[in-house]
Image: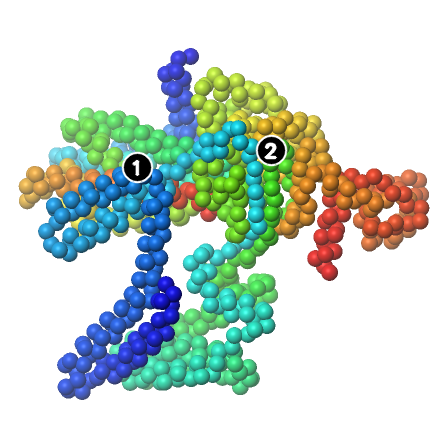
């Protein structure tokens, strides 16, 4: 077997095993839930509005994307604790990268790939928009939410409690979104919702800074999560 | 630091007396004083408090932090120092280029100078990696365990520092040197109390603040009384404490109602106050050692349960010392760790593997401190815990394939061959496609063993791996470990003596967190020489005669019972001395340990 085909086979096997572990064999239910959510809200928005705008699509796609990424990032460590595999994982050298970082990247890749059919459906059925920029902007939000979930799960060490905190933080950010509006600090800043009273160059700069803030925050949260995972004792009850 | 410590007293005296002298001015209400007095006095009090805090707390802490940071920077490789230096210069350039005002320049400079090294520390700490090359292949592994202590439920460092004073007083009391407060040390609190009463009820005008200040005064008086009661234990003082605790809030609430005429507010405040008082009393009770919820009357048990589960005031986790200063040396070969259930074997193994942190003591692997290089050393250690689970929705083959990938076997053909080998060695090859959830306990244990055999690092640690295995499998696995121990350290924890006697070069017996023996199985067997006896007794007298004896085994033969026992002296006239076994020595050690502890 050639080296490249061996690598591909390894990647495929690793992806398959991790998917089975992350979603506990219930992956199809998560995809279905996200799809149903997307279809229901897509229909409601389409019927309520006489014409659709690109900024509505961003909101419409953001929720199923967050839904897909929420469970694995928040409940990832809890699932291992429930399966009593934590101690075995802690015995693997570089477990933080080989186990949880790999799973984290896989979730992001999965959401990235899942966004293509979702966005394609919205593009075909609702309104035409540039697919790639839309997906990339959504991925910045997904990256931040997943990094926050991952970091909190390593701090709280309980999936349910992390989920509650994430929901509270989500509500807090949503309330702030109204106040912050077009500020670069708005986590839910919709890059396709160009304000009428703002110069386009200024708006582009705000979006750039917003994406930078979310990206750097995600990186810091991810590193903090990895640092927390070094404290093995705190994860064993 | 020492200079700072020696100045604590004069600085505090100056600050406190100045602040106290400023209070009348700050509270002044007369016509001429009101305009300038309070702002002046408040500025002086605020400024002095802040500067005292800076002098006594922040500056020493900052200095200490800078010392540590500089030591860390000095320890970095030259290349990293140069990179960090260049980044700081670039950062400073950006700050001075982009910022206009002096304040932003200052803030930016501070952020760059402090932030860049911190960011480097953070990134390098987060991304630490395991490496097998931390110890050269040709160098034999040697593990040194020195005075290892593990206390479960130990408070965090911050909590321990916060309670340090109380802990010292407690230790002094235990040592018979009670640190009683002196009467004169408490006297000065009386004028302060008088001031607080005046402040709460005569100076403040808002109802809420009066009530709040009264609550502060109430708890302050209780604290003073508690201090006095350490000097004077009279019944009168105890009676006063009880009356004050329950009647003072009522008195305050009556005055409050008379003054503000707001019954509903008074009732709500009263209920809240009494609830806090009762919770405080319940907290004292639940925090007492040996508190049992069952000892509380059933009608109020729910309240005590509620208090016991609350953070801070609730029941504290019982501390438990699992290891009490264990010291050992472990080299290449098979090292057996023997001890009864709950002896501390798993705790020690978990600390060696870096799963748990020790409370005190050190472990060195070839002179490398495991606390400092924990992540790096993980590359040398393979570990099978005593209790473990697996992903039950996977087949054993898929699970082992995944584990093999995690353990660095990236060549798929080599991986398949290795999985086949380990599954054959535990006789699970035929079952490889069944889901793990469908396996029995023993089969899961065998898959666990197969998993640890996938990749063989230089230190192999297995915690009670033979539990749940049938005798054939147990012997097979034991033999496999012996083969592996020829070129590596194998730490094998068990409570099955036969496993140790038939496989280990060196061993240690551990009981109640202490090492009772450390040496070879042969040396340990010799401990029981001259103490193992064999004899027979009539069955009707056997129970009575051997009540105080350590009987290893016995067998009925007609009307007699033939038995083997351990005793330091010949127990019966017709008793015959027997050659000792490891089992005899183990039981003898445990018995001796129990007797020593009881005496």
Residue designated by label 1: B79
Residue B147 placement (x, y as % from top left): 57, 50
Whether residue A84 is visible: no
Residue A121's image quarter?
top left
Which numbered disc covers residue B503? none
Q: Is residue B529 left or right of residue B14?
A: right
Residue B457 placement (x, y as % from top left): 53, 30
Residue B381 or residue B136, whichever sits in front: B136
Q: In this view, does B169 lie to the left or right of B20?
A: right
Residue designated by label 2: B332
Q: Residue at x 35, y 42 (%)?
A: B76
Determine crowd level at label 1: few under 14, some 14-19, many 20+ residues with C-alpha closer than 10 A: few
Please determine whether, in this image, residue A164 is positioned above or below residue B5.
above
Please determine whether, in this image, residue B356 is positioned above or below residue B398.
below
Q: In this view, does B151 lie to the left or right of B7?
A: right
Quadrant placement of the N terminus of chain B: bottom left
Q: Nearer the viewer, mark 2 or mark 1?
A: 1
Q: Which of marks 2 and 1 is nearer the N terminus?
A: 1
Q: In this view, does A55 lie to the left or right of A165?
A: left
* Applied colour scheme: rainbow
Residue A221 placement (x, y as % from top left): 32, 43
Residue at the top extreme, as displayed: A1
Please determine if labels 2 and 1 lie on a single subunit. yes
Please determine whether, in this image, residue B450 is positioned above or below residue B273.
above
C-alpha distance separating marks 2 and 1:
37 Å
Q: Determine whether the residue tagged by mark 2 lies in a helix, strand or loop.
A: loop
Chain under numbered label 1: B
Determine crowd level at label 2: few under 14, some 14-19, many 20+ residues with C-alpha closer than 10 A: many
């Amino acid at each position: 077997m050639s080296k490249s085909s061996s690598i591909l086979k390894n990647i495929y096997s690793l992806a398959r095993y991790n998917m089975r572990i992350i979603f506990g064999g219930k992956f199809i239910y998560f995809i279905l839930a996200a799809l149903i959510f997307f279809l229901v809200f897509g229909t409601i928005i389409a019927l309520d509005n006489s014409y659709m705008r690109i900024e509505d699509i961003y909101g419409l796609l953001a929720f199923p994307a967050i839904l897909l990424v929420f469970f694995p990032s928040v409940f990832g460590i809890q699932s291992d604790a429930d399966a009593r595999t934590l101690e075995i994982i802690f015995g693997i050298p570089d477990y933080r990268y080989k186990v949880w970082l790999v799973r984290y990247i896989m979730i992001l890749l999965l959401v990235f790939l899942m966004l293509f059919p979702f966005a394609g459906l919205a593009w075909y059925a609702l309104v035409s928009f540039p697919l790639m920029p839309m997906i990339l902007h959504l991925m910045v939000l997904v990256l931040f939410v997943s990094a926050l979930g991952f970091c909190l799960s390593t701090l709280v060490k309980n999936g349910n409690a992390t989920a509650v905190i994430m929901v509270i933080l989500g509500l807090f950010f949503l309330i702030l979104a109204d106040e912050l509006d077009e500020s670069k600090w708005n986590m839910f800043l919709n890059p396709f919702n160009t304000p009428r009273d703002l110069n386009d160059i200024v708006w582009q700069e705000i979006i750039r800074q917003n994406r930078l803030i979310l990206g750097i925050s995600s990186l810091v949260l991810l590193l903090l999560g990895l640092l927390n995972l070094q404290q093995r004792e705190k994860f064993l009850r | 630091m020492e200079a700072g410590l020696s100045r604590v007293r004069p600085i505090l005296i100056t600050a406190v007396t100045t602040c106290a002298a400023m209070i009348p001015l700050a509270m002044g209400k007369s016509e001429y004083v009101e305009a300038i007095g309070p702002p002046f006095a408040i500025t002086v009090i605020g400024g002095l408090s802040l500067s005292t805090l800076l002098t006594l707390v922040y500056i020493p802490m900052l200095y200490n932090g800078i010392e540590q940071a500089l030591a860390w920077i000095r320890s970095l490789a030259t290349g990293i120092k140069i990179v960090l230096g260049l980044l700081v210069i670039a950062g400073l350039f950006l700050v001075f280029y982009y910022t206009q005002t002096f304040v932003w320049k200052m803030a930016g400079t501070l952020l760059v100078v402090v932030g860049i090294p911190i960011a480097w520390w953070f990134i390098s700490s987060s991304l630490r990696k395991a490496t097998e090359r931390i110890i050269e292949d040709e160098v034999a592994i040697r593990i040194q365990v020195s005075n290892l202590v593990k206390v479960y439920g130990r408070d965090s460092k911050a909590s321990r520092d916060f309670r340090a004073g109380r802990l010292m007083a407690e230790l002094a009391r235990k040592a018979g040197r009670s640190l009683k407060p002196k009467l004169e040390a408490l006297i000065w609190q009386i004028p302060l109390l008088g001031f607080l009463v005046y402040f709460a009820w005569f100076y403040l005008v808002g109802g809420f603040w009066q009530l709040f200040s009264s609550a502060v005064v109430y708890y302050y008086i209780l604290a003073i009384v508690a201090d006095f009661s350490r000097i004077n234990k009279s019944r009168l003082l105890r009676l006063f404490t009880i009356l004050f605790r329950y009647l003072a809030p009522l008195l305050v609430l009556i005055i409050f109602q008379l003054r503000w005429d707001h019954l509903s507010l008074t009732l709500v405040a009263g209920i809240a106050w009494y609830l806090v008082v009762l919770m405080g009393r319940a907290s004292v009770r639940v925090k007492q050692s040996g508190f049992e919820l069952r000892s509380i009357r059933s009608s109020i048990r729910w309240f005590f349960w509620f208090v016991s589960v609350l953070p801070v005031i609730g029941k504290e986790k019982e501390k438990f010392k699992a290891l009490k200063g264990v010291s050992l040396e472990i080299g290449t070969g098979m090292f057996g760790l023997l001890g009864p259930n709950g002896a501390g074997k798993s705790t020690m193994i978990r600390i060696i593997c870096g799963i748990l942190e020790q409370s005190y003591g050190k472990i060195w692997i070839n002179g490398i401190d495991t606390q400092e290089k924990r992540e790096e050393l993980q590359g040398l250690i393979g570990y099978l815990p005593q209790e473990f689970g697996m992903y039950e929705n996977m087949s054993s083959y898929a699970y082992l394939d995944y584990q093999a990938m995690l353990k660095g076997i990236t060549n798929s053909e080599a991986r398949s061959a290795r999985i086949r080998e380990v599954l054959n060695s535990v006789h699970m090859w035929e079952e490889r496609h069944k889901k793990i959830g469908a396996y029995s306990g023993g089969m899961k244990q065998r898959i666990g063993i197969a998993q640890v055999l996938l990749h063989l690092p230089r230190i192999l640690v297995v915690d009670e791996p033979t539990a749940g295995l049938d005798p054939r499998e147990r012997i097979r696995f034991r033999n496999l470990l012996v083969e592996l121990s020829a070129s590596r350290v194998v730490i094998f924890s068990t409570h099955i003596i036969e496993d140790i006697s038939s496989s280990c070069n060196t061993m240690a017996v551990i009981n109640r967190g202490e090492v009772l023996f450390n040496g070879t199985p042969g040396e340990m067997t010799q401990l029981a020489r001259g103490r193992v006896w064999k004899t027979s007794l009539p069955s009707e007298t056997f129970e009575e005669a051997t009540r105080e004896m350590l009987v290893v085994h016995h067998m009925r033969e007609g009307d007699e019972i033939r038995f083997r026992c351990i005793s330091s002296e010949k127990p019966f006239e017709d008793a015959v001395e027997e050659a000792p076994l490891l089992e005899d020595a183990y039981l003898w050690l445990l018995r001796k340990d129990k007797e020593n502890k009881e005496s």
